[in-house]
Image (spheres, coloured by chain):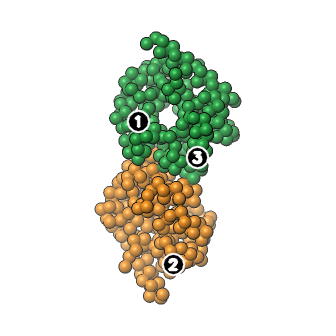
Chain colours: A orange, B green
Amino acid sequence: MKTGWELYVITDRGLAGGRPVGEVVRQALEGGAEVIQLREKTLPTGKMVELAAALKELTQAYGARVIVNDRLDVALAVDADGVHLGQEDMPARIARRLLGPEKLLGVSVSSVEEALRAVEDGADYVGAGAVFPTATKGEAGVIGIEGLRAIAAAVDLPVVAIGGIDRAKAAEVIAAGAAGVAVVSAVMAAPDPKEAAREILSTVVQAARARAGRT
Amino acid sequence: MKTGWELYVITDRGLAGGRPVGEVVRQALEGGAEVIQLREKTLPTGKMVELAAALKELTQAYGARVIVNDRLDVALAVDADGVHLGQEDMPARIARRLLGPEKLLGVSVSSVEEALRAVEDGADYVGAGAVFPTATKGEAGVIGIEGLRAIAAAVDLPVVAIGGIDRAKAAEVIAAGAAGVAVVSAVMAAPDPKEAAREILSTVVQAARARAGRT
């Protein structure tokens, strides 16, 4: 029984290594990705809107969802399924007001305090991390498995674990209480994104089943 | 008789030379600026929203208006008076739909064709330029006084002239049909932004009066 948060893939044009983002996303969706987050920091807004529109069409075709990182304007422009905000982005309570009650709102958190504030501000899910060090950010802001466990215990929302998660580590974060995993390089940089997505999803689903069996 | 478009000041943190943008804007408003455009390309969205909120409060106190460059999300977050879009930003017709009919929508144009499309897409005014070469962009995209005159003749909307305009050149662009001038460095980098704004505004008002007398 899936919740829809098992496999959450975040785009990264650089990691796609010259392949069009839309093509890597299509393969990830083939492999079972349920949420695609468009994270794009450098394109002009017009190009972001074009890419978001393409990802919306793709995710709809696969029964998946598309969420835009930071840019509520881009999300509204293409009627995306939601917005994901970091702690330096627009305050979540303002985003909730502008999005209305139906759209998904996610917030990146790295502490129980931030997670509780996200709940108060109207988040539908939180992205908790970085659970492990990453190539881009190193040890900065790493909360570890214990940090993740504390956040998952503190809030009733789905907690998506992020930061240095690959197939090998996916089972561990699910055991700690995460609803799913958010991955960037594990899918975007994979030679076979479909197979990579399928393997991570299968690991997550198995780990969630094992956790349910224990409780 | 002023139209409200005579003096349009665009922010630039770099040109403010260490002075807070809000302080330079306050002085520009003291000098008579009627529209302040927040143009900010590098701050995290949360900081942009804070700055936009501060500029909204300031402009309201002076009976002026605040317009956000590119970022419709930031404009919506603080209920700004409008949004200004470049040709690489979100399509204007989408922005008009998201903003509703009441908010101001401006579009940067550098040809009659772009100006006519802006009208069709629901713009309330156009920014036409670059009329003169600028320090940052040099000769790129310069339309000259004749380019400005053609745009002003082609559309019924207020045309705000932009690009390398200082007090000395303000009269010339008004004579060519512009409703007002948009300035960046002429106010943001001025040692006395209030006095700079006052002088440009006075030149524009006089030139508009002279033009009205001729027609």
Q: Amino acid at mark 2?
A: Gly
Which residue in the rendered view is the most extreme toward the left? A61
Labelled disc at residue B29? none
N-terminal of the pair, mark 1 or mark 3, is 3
Residue B73, relative to residue B13: is it above or below? Answer: below
Q: Indicate whether A15 appears above or below B175.
A: below
Kindly report which numbered mark, 2 or 3, lies closer to the viewer in this rendering.
Answer: 3
Q: Taking A1 as reference, is B130 above or below it?
A: above
Amino acid at circle 3: Ala
Q: Chain of mark 3?
A: B
Residue at 48% x, 28% y is: B160
Residue A51 at x, y percent in the picture? 39, 52
Circles 2 and 1 on the same chain: no
The residue to which callout 3 is attached is: B53
Name the residue at 44% across, 58% down: A100
Q: CA distance from mark 2 to mark 1?
A: 50 Å
SS under mark 1: loop
**Which image quarter: residue A204?**
bottom left
- Residue B202 in picture, x, y percent from top left: 59, 21
* Numbered circle sitting on residue A177: 2
User: Helix, strand or loop at disc 2?
Assistant: loop
For mark 3, does the 10 Å Cα neighbourhood hold few (<14), some (14 to 19), or many (20 or more) residues? Answer: some
Crowd tier of the residue under label 1, counting other residues whose Cα lies within 10 Å: few below 14, some 14–19, many 20 or above: many
Residue flagged by tag 1: what amino acid is it? Ala
Q: Say which residue label 1 marks.
A: B123
Subunit under mark 2: A
Residue A26, percent from left and from top? 34, 62
Q: Camera-side residue: B2 or A6?
A: B2
Check the image and name the residue furthest to the bottom: A214
CA–CA distance in space, label 1 to label 3: 23 Å
In which quarter of the view is residue B143 placed? Answer: top left
